[in-house]
Amino acid sequence: MKKLVIGILAHVDAGKTTLSESLLYLSGKIRKIGRVDNKDAFLDNYELERARGITIFSKQAVFEIDDRQIFLLDTPGHVDFSAEMERTLQVLDYAILVISAADGVQGHTKTLWRLLNIYNIPVFLFINKMDREDVDKDKLIKEIKEQLDDGCIDFGKAGTGEFYEQLAMCDEKTMEAYLEDGKIENSLISKAVAKRKVFPCFFGSALKLEGIQEFTKGIIKYSIIPNYPHEFGAKIFKITRDGQGNRLTHMKLTGGKLKVRDVLTNGVWEEKVNQIRIYSGEKFEAVNEVEAGDVIAVTGLTKARPGEGLGIEEASTFPVLEPVLQYQIILPNGCDPRAILPKLREIEEEQPEIQIVWDEHLQEIQAKVMGEVQIEILQSLIKERFDVDVAFGDGKILYKETILNTVEGVGHFEPLRHYAEVHLLLEPGERGSGLKFDTKCSEDMLSKNWQRLALTHLKEKEHKGVLTGSPITDMKITLVSGKAHNKHTEGGDFREATYRAVRQGLKEAESILLEPYYDFYLELPEKMVGRAMTDIERMNGTFEISRSNGSMTVLVGSAPVSTMRNYQKEVLAYTKGLGRLFCSLKGYDICHNQEEVIQSIGYDSEKDAENPTGSIFCQQGAGFFVEWYRVKEHMHLESYLKKETNLETETDESKKTNYSEEKTISLEEIDKIINKTFYANQGKKSGWKKRKAPTYSYYKTSNYVGKKEEKKDEYLLVDGYNIIFAWQELKELADENMDGAKTKLLDLLSNYQWIRRCEIIVVFDAYRVEGHREEVMDYYNIRVVYTREAQTADEYIEKFAHDNKKKYDITVATSDSLQQIIVQGEGCALLSAKELKAEIIQANKRMQEEYEEKKGIDRNYLMDSLSKKAKKQMEDMVKGEG
């Protein structure tokens, strides 16, 4: 039987559970539709869920429609349990996104849409509660297109011209099909849905079973069954425990088959499957064998974790959503924290979004969660499972830190018989980008295995910032330099040096504090809008009026979690229960009260013994500690940023000086110098010749008198940095982006080569780059040279001119007066930067003129070649058609 895994997602109160009940009822899986308010929903089978009327844990139901077996995964809608929902996304073939017609696209709906895009899951939309009064269908579909995607199309109009026209605008293939046939086949529509080009929208009321049948048929009609490989693979997405305490590992098979007693491994652990269960609601069927496409739970695995891949399946990336609040777990008197901690780890396994932390310094257990509702659930679970009454302290915001400028962090670890030095480039990233790691370190400086080790140490630890000790984020950390000792370096040395390099860099950088923000949706009576606006401004939030119907108004916006997290109770109080506040995590942004938070936390980065900011150096056989601000005075390697600065500023300064000298020494004066030095005893002028003006140098026909000289290949050598800083437009670009200036120069010379038809070599200095070897590369039709260490562009050009002056006709483009004298002494022609620019402009102008001349040539027309009789017949035909 064909298998399809479908997840159902929604903003809280959109009617997700009711839709699940309707789908199960119409498929014949259940005989009666359960209700959330009646506490008898088929999938909300935990007592906590029925008591609170919300879905807390994702669960599955299995039913059949036509020839398909559907695994329906119901996910939590409340924002506090979004991480539980996100884990389920990893195993879905398709998703159903439920939107309330009464509320439209809400804040958490956008979060869900963003996650579905990240995980690349095709989506069917069901717009629920269409039985409500004052619901405007056209307005709703317009809002969905604007807020989510223009590919959201009303499939209730399937088969109409308007339907096909909208489909045609979503994908090239559907457009081609529509233009050829005037309609689009279902197979093409299904492919467009699978590629996330089209998002089918269906309308109805789950409570009244309106539109559900059409929605079910639409899913079957426009979904494609995945093709699975024969080789075994599985994705683990959840851990739970049954009533008897058995650990259940939930997974989807993505390839091959699985039997009871099979041995599974992720490369680290290896364990045997004792039982295979297929759950539907709270009941399950034990089976001996399952195949690809099945969603199952197995017993016997004690080390598996959510997100792990088995067989051919790779592990998942870290969840996008993460905790933003932290609470101290207060244990009853006589309860040993170290005894309860392993039990709390069981709950953490089942709900990774709840992170249990043991603070050794404070000797207390802390829980990191996404919201306050999770705290209530955690409290109930601990009581129910372990019969322990716990309380919670005041919640604290989980802050993060990042930097505003680029710095180089240096870490050195050299106690006796140990050695490692690491240089890291810390660069600020975009907000929400997290941490990214890279390496730009030469293997001549540090071997590949030490580089990999340093990167491993960067990734293995949660690095603390220096303002509050909060985790760092939104930056790129690049290994740019390092050093090991052939005899004394051990793996742990690079761990110490890497950690210290991060901290030293953070101390030098301009750090800022980030705090979590909510996107909110606030609906309340119109007469209370003024009060709400005042409150939001007081909470340092931003807002706008989304809509108003005369009695109720909706405000949407964002505000810090720290100021808004208790606002729900206030809204209920001053609106007398009429107001509704929904929040979804927006992400981290600049803290609104940074100084106040830093002062209240009171973190001293230089007294954090576990995260030192300084380094260890060795002198006279003994190690000694160096404070972070003096590390660079003692470091053994040259600063990476200093080398870059020298390369792009010191070298550039010399180029600027050289160009200014063009005004003080002319080519005629250089001619006199050459004749007084190189050719002083020859009784004649030098053998080199000044280039003629650009207008005549290339385009004017040469007149040869007497014996014709043997024609040599022409070479033009360009001193890259000299020209860049001699041309004003390139100099201005270089001040902002040197790479951009280089590219522009190379593009101009590449175009010039096509006109001039000579060999062009552009030479750039790299002589200050330690260990750099000469690098030669082709840029389209010209050649680019980066000189080796200790060799300047001048030296390269001089050597080339000396070695090849008899073989080639060489011209050098530079405004460096000393270099001009030297290359002219080698018998080469010379172009100053100003003359090179003029010649390029003239060459382009000439080509344009030639092109215009060709365009102006008279063309042969058919009518001109016809006889008078034929022309008359053609004219009569035209008149006849008229």
Image (cartoon, grey):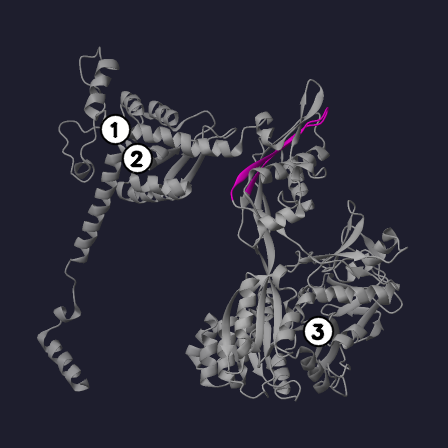
In the image: residue 796, left or right of residue 49: left
In the image: residue 864, left or right of residue 401: left
- The first of marks 1 and 2 along the sequence is 1
Instruction: Determine crowd level at label 2: few under 14, some 14-19, many 20+ residues with C-alpha closer than 10 A.
Output: many
Range covered by the magenta-colored residues: 405-426
Above/below status of 587 relative to 807: below
Q: Mark 2 points at which residue?
A: 726
In the image: residue 577, left or right of residue 531: right
Check whether the beta carbons of the residues at disc 1 and disc 2 lie within 8 A of each other. yes
Check whether the beta carbons of the residues at disc 2 and disc 3 lie within 8 A of each other. no
Q: Position of residue 66 (x, y in %)?
A: 69, 83
Q: Position of residue 1 (x, y in %)?
A: 72, 77
Dominant secondary structure of the residues highlighted in magenta in the image:
strand
Q: Which of 188 and 489 is in front in this view?
A: 489
Specify whether residue 545 is in view: yes
Measured in 3D between alpha carbons, the distance from the residue under mark 2 to the one under mark 3, in whole angstroms, is 67 Å
Q: Mark 3 points at which residue?
A: 74
Q: Mark 1 points at which residue?
A: 662
Looking at the rendered structure, the secondary structure element under dot 1 is: helix
Quadrant containing the C terminus in the rendered view: bottom left
Looking at the rendered structure, the secondary structure element under dot 3 is: strand
Q: Identify which residue is drawn at 57% across, 41% down.
A: 478
Looking at the rendered structure, the secondary structure element under dot 2 is: helix
| Res 427 → quadrant | top right
Q: Position of residue 126 (x, y in %)?
A: 60, 79
